[in-house]
Image (tube, rainbow, N blue to C red):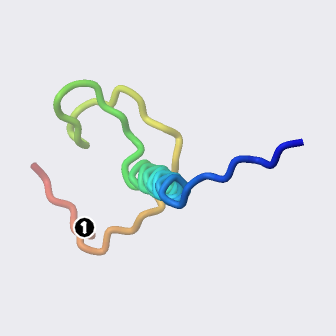
Amino acid sequence: MSEPVKHKPWVKTSHWIITMSFLILVFTGIEILMVHPRLYWGEVGNDLTPAFLELPISRNHQWSDWEEEVSF
């Protein structure tokens, strides 16, 4: 049998960079959904507009600067 083909170092390096970038993207996406688990449809979205989809994720993030409620 023939020996397996070895990839060049730049190919291995680029694959590891892409893999790490993807994992960081997944991690930050999960972190964003844990802080604000509402998905919106349209150009804007915040707590004052109705959500297109609200995920059943608990809000575990603690806002230390937002303890006081402000009415609009």
* Viewer-nearest residue: 37 or 47: 37
Looking at the image, residue 39 sits to the left or right of residue 8; the answer is left
Q: How crowded is mark 1: few (under 14 residues within 10 Å), some or many (20 or more)?
A: few
Q: Specify whether 60 is left or right of 47.
A: right
Say which residue appears at 43% left-offset and 35% top-offset: 54
Residue 70 horizontal/vertical position (percent): 15, 59
Q: Name above or below for residue 37 compared with residue 68.
A: above
Say which quadrant the N terminus sits in. Answer: top right
- Residue most extreme to the right: 1
Q: Residue furthest front?
A: 2
Specify whether 29 is left or right of 16.
left
Q: Identify whether 70 is placed above or below 36.
A: below
The residue positioned 22% from the left and 33% from the top of the image is 49
Q: Which is more toward the observer, 1 or 41?
A: 1
Under circle 1, the secondary element is loop
Q: Which residue lies furthest to the bottom in this view?
A: 64
Report which residue position mark 1 lands on.
Answer: 66
Determine if residue 27 is in view: no
**Residue 52 quadrant:** top left
State the residue at coordinates (48%, 38%): 55
Note whether residue 26 is visible. yes
- The three-letter code of the residue at mark 1 reads Trp
Instruction: Pick the residue in front: 11 or 34.
Output: 11
Numbered-mark total: 1
Residue 66: x, y in percent?
24, 67
Q: Residue at 47% x, 51% y: name it.
A: 18
Please determine whether, in this image, residue 3 is positioned above or below residue 39: below
Image coords of residue 62 (percent x, y)? 39, 68
Locate residue 63, reporting x and y percent: 32, 68
49 to the left or right of 7: left
**In front of the other: 26 or 18:** 18
